[in-house]
Amino acid sequence: MQPKEIKNLNYLKTRQQIGYVALNDASYADYKRIGFMSGLEVHQQLNTSEKLFCRCPSCILQASNDYHAEIIRHMRPTLSEMGVYDGTALMEFKTKKEITYRINKSTACTYDIDDTPPFPINREALQKALEISHICNFDIVGEVHITRKQYLDGSIPAGFQRTAILGVNGSIDLGYKKVNLIQLSIEEDSCREISDIGHSRVYKTDRLGVPLIETVTAPELFTPWELKDAAQQIRLINRLSGNSRDGMGAGRQDVNVSCAGGTRIEIKGVSHNKWIPKLSHNEAFRQWALLNIQKVLQSRVDKDDWKMSYCEIDIFNYSEIENIAKNCGQLFNKVVAINLPHFKHVLSHFTQPYRDFSDEISDRLKVIACIEKPNILSSEDIHNEITPNLFSKIKLDLNANIDDAQIIIWGPEADIATALETVEERCLMAFDEIPHETRKAFANGTTMFERVLPGADRMYPDTDSVPIPLKNEWIDELKENCFFNLGSQLNMLFEWEVPIDTHFYLLRNRLNQTIDNLTKYGYTHRQISCIFGHRIKKLHKVTGFNKEFDFSKTVELFDFASVNNLNIDFIKEVINCAIRECNTDLIYVANSILVKLEHKFSISEIVMHAENVASTINNQIDQNCLTNWLIGQVKPNSLGAISLSKLSELLTSQE
């Protein structure tokens, strides 16, 4: 449900000040003005029988309560090979999370919990990943080196993910521009999250270890729509290869966005491509807004002189705070009021639709201090209706100045120290940087802080896995058997003005050449494509997508119609009847229909029959209704012999 419209004057003023426009109203000039830049990391599960580094079955998903055992772990950061800690690992360690894994014995083994070394890499997965690399024009590496990538959010029980680069310097064609691809990697998928509340996070391990490829584009997508098109193209390539798994969660995108003067922000795990334009649009303007906040703060005070102050307050003296805080869903025993010097009109500064800078603080309190929302009240609150005198006494207790702002936070006493540190850290960042973050996506196009953006310090070699040489003979063989050139085939469909909703079916079943051949019967590419992409697709679905479909039967139907001087309406009726009867023997169905038709009537006799029928109809009836009624009466006798448009023309002339 969409939040109610915000009427806070400063929120509205700052939204206008930064020049925010809604996605549907934005132009290329708007994105050029803010320096919009983006790229993608597209993750796609491979359709294999086994997982990547063990022999457990792949892609068998279970319900959240379908498990045989639970394992609890607490994550700790380790030094990289350069002797430093990754910032993300340190942040996750600060949350003091207790990670629970629900394990089903049919899809997990001791490898998944890091009690057994990895098996040799799944060769089926490796081959399928290399085939997709060829389709995307990657230069294939000569030797595969498996590395470890730290994941301290608990999504992988071992605390790291095994991954390897397979190809570099690839490209895709969007039709209107070429997009360079940096690399394609193969890696193991992570666990599926069940819940994340307070200091407890619960996962299930059915998806853990499933082979996954990651395709990374260069940051050269300059509008949200280009970004979506690139995601669609990579998704199409993966699916058309026949090597990927379909279904919810099988494909996910990490969307990287920045603006001029901003930084790379990663919007994590976007599962629907239709979300991409709004998410990237709002993220670019969020950064643009944060840059404006920087200017405001730098004009007011030097960062080195800035220091917040706070004091504990008795919630029972403030009924408004008590009522709002009680909705947080967890016990709390400490409430703290914080003064933020020179932050007047900053807390309510627009950042995203229905969100302001105070939400930037609130998000981090939820993630880092593990204090569930609602967890904050602001003296400039845009989400809650607060009486003007609520903060009056608090301002006196904090000895606040007129250009200061205040917030109130609450939570368990054990988390308040981390919460205060988190508030101060985020406010100090506002002076001179846009934090490097991974953000969580929501369907309404907004995002929230998820964790600090990982850096190169989390990567190190996997000492359990030996390098895998890729023989030139094998790579060349895979390339020869590679899927046809997608770009040229897709351009062909655009030239034929084929409906977009048919593209995937036509390309996956490699029907372009068949369609081109059938134009010899006098039909357009578009007409034939719709027969395949709409009607035959429906028949295919009715008779089972998992079964091999004989498209030569459709070609035979076109031949049959031509020999019997029947047009495309007859072909459509045959397929419709085949769908109803779940029968793929199109020639049998065609003969059955032909027997029922009275083609002994000539066109003139059909028209004469229509005249006789029309003479019995009241002359006062609407002419269009009469024509449509007459068509319905004579259509069964004329199916395939004359087009409906021509029949309508003849009947109209007789009236």
Image (cartoon, rainbow, N blue to C red):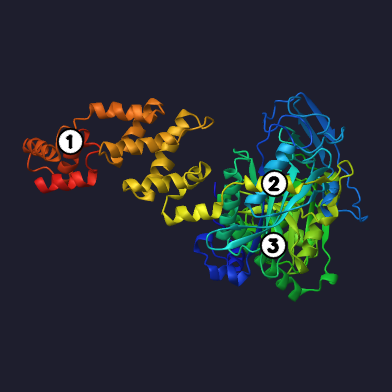
Q: Give the residue pinned by disc 3.
A: 347
**Is 246 drawn above or below residue 256 in the view shown?**
above
Give neighbour class at mark 1: few <14, some 14-19, many 20+ (Cα, 10 Å): some
Mark on residue 506?
A: none
Q: Specify few, some or many for label 2: CA neighbours under 10 Å numbering under 14, 14-19, or 20 or more.
A: many
Quadrant for residue 542, please give it: top left
Residue 598, by quadrant, is top left
Of the pair 72 and 113, the residue shown nearer to us: 113
- Residue sitting at 90 percent across and 52 percent down? 80
Residue 165 locus on image (x, y percent)? 76, 50
* Mark 1 vs 3, N-terminal side: 3
Q: Earlier in the sequence, mark 2 or mark 3?
A: 2
Residue sticking out furthest to the bottom: 299
Identified by mark 3, the residue type is Leu
Q: Amino acid at mark 1?
A: Val
Secondary structure under tag 1 reads: helix
The residue located at (49%, 42%) in the rendering is: 505
* 397 horizontally vs 651: left or right: right
Name the residue beneath numbered marker 1: 634
**Looking at the image, can residue 139 be seen?**
yes
Q: Is residue 26 above or below residue 89?
A: below
